[in-house]
Image (cartoon, grey):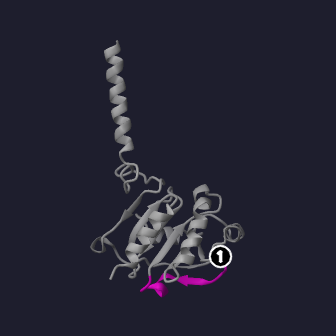
Amino acid sequence: MRRVRAGVTAVVLAFALVGCASIGRPDAGSQGAGYEAGDGSFTTWDTAERGQGIVLTGTTFAGEVLDLEDWRGDVVVINFWYASCPPCRAEAADLAAIAGDYPDIHLLGINPRDDAGTAQAFERTFGIPYPSLWDKDASGVAAMQGLVPLQAMPTTVVLDRDGRVAARVLGQADPAILRGLIDDVVAEA
C-alpha cells in the first residue's frame, strides 16, 4: 500500500511540476488548451511573421473619431479594459506612467463593456492621459480577431510602425515586461 501511495504521489508531483514549468514563459501554459490564460504571459512576433496592419476607426468616450491609420509610422500600444476588472484597475497607473515616459508612442484604450460615464469616471480616477474607444459594437475586438481573446481582460498589444501586432500581453501587464516589449518595437528599423 505504501508503494502504491508513493507511486501515486510521485505521479501527482510530476504533473504538478510540469504544470509549473510554464510560469514566466510566453503562452506556454495555454497553447492548444482552447483558451488564452490572462496571466500576464506574453507573445512576440518577428517582423516576417506579422500579419497586416490593424484597421480600426472608432469614437472615443469624449466623442472624438479616432482612426489608427492616422498613427501609421508610430508605435502604438493598445489596452483592452473595462472599469470593474480588477487587473485593469491594478495596471492603470503603470499604463499612465508609460504614456508619460514614452511621448513618441501612442497609447489607446479599447473598452467593450462600459458606458461613457463609467469609463470616464475610471479615466479620471486613475489619471489616464490617453483616449479610449467606446467599443460597444466590438469592432476593436473584431479588428484583432485571433489575437485578443475576450476572456483575457485586460489584454495589451504593441503595434509596430506599420500597424501590425508585434507583441501581446494577456492579463495584467508587468510594467517592466511591457516597457521591454515597447523598447524592442521602438528600436526596430
- Position of the C terminus, as image quadrant, is bottom left
User: How far across and down, in percent of the image, does residue 119 sit?
Assistant: 67, 68
Residue 8 higher or lower than 58, as above or below: above
As rendered, which of 158 and 135 lies closer to the eye?
Answer: 158
User: How far across and down, in percent of the image, does residue 53 sit?
Assistant: 39, 78
Q: Secondary structure at mark 1?
A: loop
As rendered, which of 163 and 186 lies closer to the eye?
Answer: 186
As rendered, which of 71 and 35 lies closer to the eye?
Answer: 71
Residue sitting at the far top: 1
Residue 37 higher or lower than 122, as above or below: above
Residue 56 visible in the current orientation: yes
- Position of the N terminus, as image quadrant, is top left
User: For the magenta stretch, what is the residue range?
Assistant: 61-74
Residue that mark 1 sits on = 61
Please say whether residue 72 is one of the residues in the magenta stretch.
Answer: yes
Q: Amino acid at mark 1?
A: Phe
Which residue is found at the position 61% from the left and 55% from the top? 86
Write down the quadrant of residue 117 in the picture.
Answer: bottom right
